[in-house]
Image: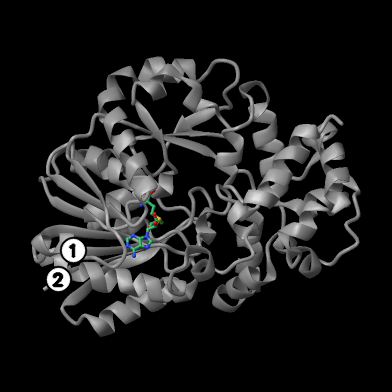
Amino acid sequence: MKSELLKQIFIEFCESQTHLEGLLSKVPNAQKAKIAISFGAFLRRPLSIAQTLGVDFKLTPEEFWSMSFIRLKKFSPIYDLFEVLWDRLPEIPSDGSLQDFPQKLTETWISDWGQDAAKSYARILSQDPLTTIRLHRRARANEEEMNAHFKTDGFPKSRAGRYSPYARVFKGYAPVLATSFFEKGFFEIQDEGSQVMSMFALSPEMVAPLLFEMPSAEKKDVNVAALMKHFETLPAMTVVDACAGGGGKTLAMADLMSGQGRIYAYDVYDRKIQSLKKRAERAEERSIQAVCLKGDDLSPLKKFYGSADRVFLDSPCNGAGVLRRNPDTKWNRKPYAEKEGFLPIEELQQKVVRDYYPLVKRGGKLVYGVCTFQKSETIDQVKWIQSEFPDLKLECSGFLGPYETDGFFMASFTKV
Ligand SMILES: C[S@@+](CC[C@H](N)C(=O)[O-])C[C@H]1O[C@@H](n2cnc3c(N)ncnc32)[C@H](O)[C@@H]1O
């Protein structure tokens, strides 16, 4: 079977529900690009691909998306599809539709933003993602040499970022991690929207003009040079990055502050904090102090009460805005709370605000962000923060993406 590797990777996915990136890390380099493209496309738009390639699943979308992983693993039409997909990859559609997402997700999009908007989100979020890198300040002198390398075989076309002065955007899968530039810490993989959110966390007023009242495909003109100039002269700040995860935005903020100031990065998972520390070392960022907070013990935070210029809450969320990048998350049948052993997602977001609010100093800012566009996790949470904390004044808020960039919502409050 030519598609044996696809079959194996799907079985592993059903058994372990590992993220796409994790699954790909186990694939031999020679086959990585084809597997990344074919398996990624399957996860993003399974039913549209099956339809186009003439493989009949004999199920309604609703029935398909309600199948357990145990049943999916034994569902032979998927293996028939892999066989065809492997040979006819160039024929597959580049975008899908509502049928390629679980109904519980699309119903929320429809009730929040209407049928037409939901169709548009489904079309865009079933496409293959761009690969975007963020150039580190140390590497700016090497930019030309890197760009020349990125024009060689194996790399798709690339262009400069439209929103972030430090971004280079590749049209599709690009093997950027297998370069010596990555090993030297010259760049990180980071979506432009995520780069913009890092800028927002430090200087919301500079980024607010890029935001929309609802997730939108419209584009706004960005004065990238002005942004760059602004960040070159940013004063050193004390930043608390409360949901730092693997540190994508922590590293971006450290870079934007030119290694000045101090960033205290927290997460509840030690493996994420360890990964952040490794990445900070590779990027030679010394302004970051990363700590894992165990359970509900918030005592390590007490010494910072009333002292942070910025408290950035890149909160856990349902991740709809990054479904192109993490299509595996829509396959997961368990609700977030059950999966993580946490509170329901909206309650967890509110808990994080409550836990970290005391750290903001007077005149400082609390910045709330999520990579989703569900109302209950975005504009409803802004209303909740306003009613719960009268001394937090809403400065600006809005959506970015999920079109050219991944989909984000961000809001900034000043403590008076
Ligand atoms: C959206 S992710 C953060 C992504 C990260 N900032 C980045 O740029 O890569 C949300 C993070 O919040 C963490 N988290 C969940 N509950 C938390 C809590 N109660 N306190 C702090 N972090 C939490 C999760 O482990 C996850 O890493």
Task: Please indicate, yes or no, whether residue 41 appears anywhere in the rendered image.
Answer: no
Query: Label 1: few (<14), some or many (≥20) within 10 Å?
Result: many
Residue at 28%, 19% (x, y): give it.
141
Residue 410: horizontal and vertical position, in percent? Answer: 35, 62
Q: Residue furthest bottom?
A: 387
Check disc 1 and give the amino acid type. Answer: Lys
**Residue with the mark numbered 2:** 415
- 353 with respect to 66 (left or right): left
> In the rendered view, would you say 23 is above or below 264?
above
Quarter of the rendering containing residue 162: top left
> In the rendered view, would you say 167 is above or below 153?
below
Q: Nearer the viewer, residue 390 or 332?
A: 332
- Ligand 1, seen in the image, is in the quarter at bottom left
**Residue with the mark numbered 1:** 365
- Label 1 within 8 A of ligand 1 by Cβ: no
Q: Nearer the viewer, residue 176 or 300?
A: 300
Residue at 39%, 22% (x, y): give it.
183
Residue at 36%, 44% (x, y): give it.
248
Disc 1/disc 2 C-alpha distance (Å):
6 Å
Q: Nearer the viewer, residue 373 or 339?
A: 339
Query: Label 2: few (<14), some or many (≥20) within 10 Å?
Result: many
Q: Quadrant of the N terminus?
A: top right
Residue 99: horizontal and vertical position, in percent? Answer: 74, 63
Residue at 69%, 51% (x, y): give it.
14
> In the rendered view, would you say 409 is above or below 416?
above
**Earlier along the polypeptide chain: callout 1 or callout 2?**
1
Check disc 2 and give the amino acid type. Answer: Lys
- Label 2 within 8 A of ligand 1 by Cβ: no
Circles 1 and 2: CB atoms closer than 8 Å? yes
Task: Please indicate, yes or no, whether residue 218 appears anywhere in the rendered image.
Answer: yes
- 202 with respect to 215 (left or right): left
Q: Secondary structure at mark 2?
A: strand
